[in-house]
Image (cartoon, rainbow, N blue to C red):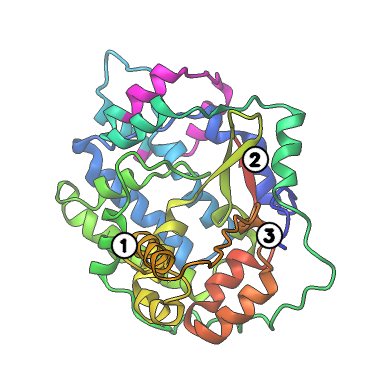
Amino acid sequence: MPPSPFSNTNTFGINLEKSKLKNSTPVLKRVPRGARRAVALSLARCVRLATQENSQSAWEDLLTFPYRILHVQKRLASKTLTTQIKDNCNNSADILDRNLRLFNASQKGLNSHVESKLNDGDISGAARLLFSSDVVAPYSPDTISALESKHPAPADDLTFPDPPDRPNPDSQIFPILAPQLLAAVSSFRSGSAGGRDGLTPQHLKDLLSSGAGDAGESLLKELLALVTLMLSGGVNDAVVDVLYGANLCALRKRDGRIRPIAVGCTYRRMAAKICCRLYGGSLTKKFQPLQLGFGSRGGCEAAVHALSTYLNSNKGEVILKVDVKNAFNSVIRDTLLAEAKKELPDIFGFLWQCYRHPLEVGVV
C-alpha cells in the first residue's frame, strides 16, 4: 500500500504549502512573444543552478519561477505586458512577497472554466467540462477525509529493496537527446495544467519555440541536464516531495463520492514521458498479451475484439470482469520498486525518489 501523501515533513514543502502560491498568484497562460527570449534566458539560469548546485535555495528559485516571473499586476497604462514580464526577469527578488500580500483568491464558475479551455485551444477539455456530471467538491473536513481515505497508510511489513547508490554528478547513466525532450514537451495536449510550481507545458512550448531564438536553445540544453539529474535519482532530497508531488483537485461525483484528480509538476511529467519512450518497446514485449494498456496501440480495441471472438467460439464459458477499487493507490510499493530495480535499473533512482517516501500534495 502506498504512503500517505498528506504528511508534511519537509520544511521547504511546508513553506510552499503555507504560502498558497498556487491559489494566490495567477500565472500567465502564455509567454508573450516579445518576452520569450528574456524569460527563456532567466529560466535557463535557474535550471542551471538547480542542476549544478542542487541546493535547496536553487531549487526553490526554480520551483517559484512562474510566480515571480510570469505573474503581473493588472495591466498598467504605462507598461505593456511584455515590458512587465521583462521587468520581472530583471527585478524578481521582491515580487513573490508582493504577490502574497496582494492575495485575493477568486472562484470561477463553469462558464469561466469552459471559456478558459477554449482560449487554450483545448476543445475536448471544454466539452468534458460541459457534459461531465462531476463538480468541484467544497473545501471542507469531509472532503479532506474522503481524499485521505483514498490514500491508505502503508503496511508495517513492507520490504523495500536497498536504495540506489548516490549517483556521481559527473557521470551520466545514459544521454538524453534534444529530439527526445522536444518530443516529450510537444506531446502534452493543449491546455494541460501545471503542478504546484505553476509551470505549464505551454510555457515550455513557448520558450522552446523559434520565437525564443538562441535563448530557447540554451534553455533546451539546461533542461536536458535537469532531466538527466532527475532520472539518475540525484535530486536534492529536500525538494523531492514538492518536485514529485502534485496538486490534488477533488471532484464530487453524481453519487456523492469523491474523484481525486492529481496534477504533477511539468518537469516530472516531462521526465516520465521520456522514460516511457525509452522503455516502452521493451516493456510492451514483457506485458503482452496479458496487459494491453501501456505501450499497446489500440490495446483496448484488441481486448474487446478478442473477448467477443472468445465468447462466440466457446459456448457455456463464464467471463469474470473485475474493477479493483482504488487500485492505483493500493499498489504495494515495495513490490513495485523491487521489480523496477530488476527490470529498469537505469531509472531506478528516479522511481525510488518518486515512490519510496510520502510526497507533498496541495489540495486546491
Labels 1 & 2 near each other (Cβ < 8 A) = no
Question: The C terminus is located in which quarter?
Answer: top right
Image quadrant in which you'd find residue 329: bottom right
Is 247 situated above or below 52?
Answer: above
Q: What whole-number distance in Å separates the C-alpha atoms at marks 1 and 2?
A: 40 Å
The numbered mark at residue 330 is: 3
Image quadrant in which you'd find residue 354: bottom right
Q: Amino acid at mark 1?
A: Gly
Residue 150 in the image: x percent, y percent? 70, 48
Labels 3 & 1 near each other (Cβ < 8 A) = no
The numbered mark at residue 22 is: none
Q: Nearer the viewer, residue 216 or 197?
A: 197
List the residue tagged with mark 2. 17
Q: For the point 28% across and 38% down, which residue is it?
A: 31
Q: For the point 35% across and 26% down, which residue is it?
A: 116
Q: Earlier in the sequence, mark 3 or mark 1?
A: 1
Q: For the point 49% across and 79% down, which residue is it?
A: 169
User: Is residue 130 rendered to the left or right of residue 329?
Assistant: left
The numbered mark at residue 298 is: 1
Q: Earlier in the sequence, mark 3 or mark 2?
A: 2
Comparing marks 3 and 2, which lies closer to the viewer? 3
Q: Tell me the SS state at disc 3.
A: helix
Q: Amino acid at mark 3?
A: Ser
Q: Which residues are magenta?
A: 89-117
Question: The N terminus is located in which quarter?
Answer: bottom right
Comparing marks 3 and 1, which lies closer to the viewer? 1
User: Is residue 128 rendered to the left or right of residue 94?
Assistant: left
